[in-house]
Image (tube, rainbow, N blue to C red):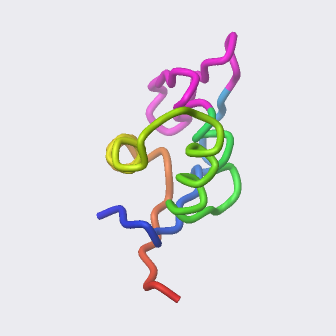
Amino acid sequence: MVTAYTSIVARQDQVSSDLAGETVILDLKSGVYYGLNSVGASIWNLIQEPKTVNEVRDVLLAKYQVEPEQCDRDLKALLEELEAEGLIEVHNETAA
């Protein structure tokens, strides 16, 4: 389960490319392509290095006009989908 303190990072066994503000990801293990819209692409770019969900959320809130609750829901839903597809590594941590 993805929480505010979960550490996330894109897996290394894939390649991605920017296409006019959107991102296409190729999972090298399965050969499956995935597409992300511009917001998803922003998230993908942020998690090329390990970040907590809170860190990503804070960047999104500063960059986009979105209510914090909506941002939380959408971000966690996307991260859970990326995790289910094996595109990211998720490490649950406790609050500091």
Q: Is residue 5 above or below residue 48?
A: below
**Extreme bottom residue here?**
96
Residue 26 seen in render: no
Q: Is residue 78 left or right of residue 58?
A: left
Q: How many marks?
A: 0
Residue 50, image x, y percentages: 64, 62
Residue 59, image x, y percentages: 64, 49
Q: Residue at x 55, y 29 (%)?
A: 39
Magenta segment: 17-41
Residue 49's image quarter? bottom right
Residue 67, image x, y percentages: 41, 41
Q: Is residue 6 above or below residue 28?
A: below
Q: Residue at x 29, y 64 (%)?
A: 1
Closer to the camera in the image, 28 or 58: 58
**Extreme top residue here?**
20
37 in magenta = yes
Residue 30 seen in render: yes
32 in magenta = yes
Closer to the camera in the image, 13 or 79: 79
Q: Residue at x 53, y 33 (%)?
A: 65
Residue 12, image x, y percentages: 64, 50
Q: Residue at x 61, y 23 (%)?
A: 23
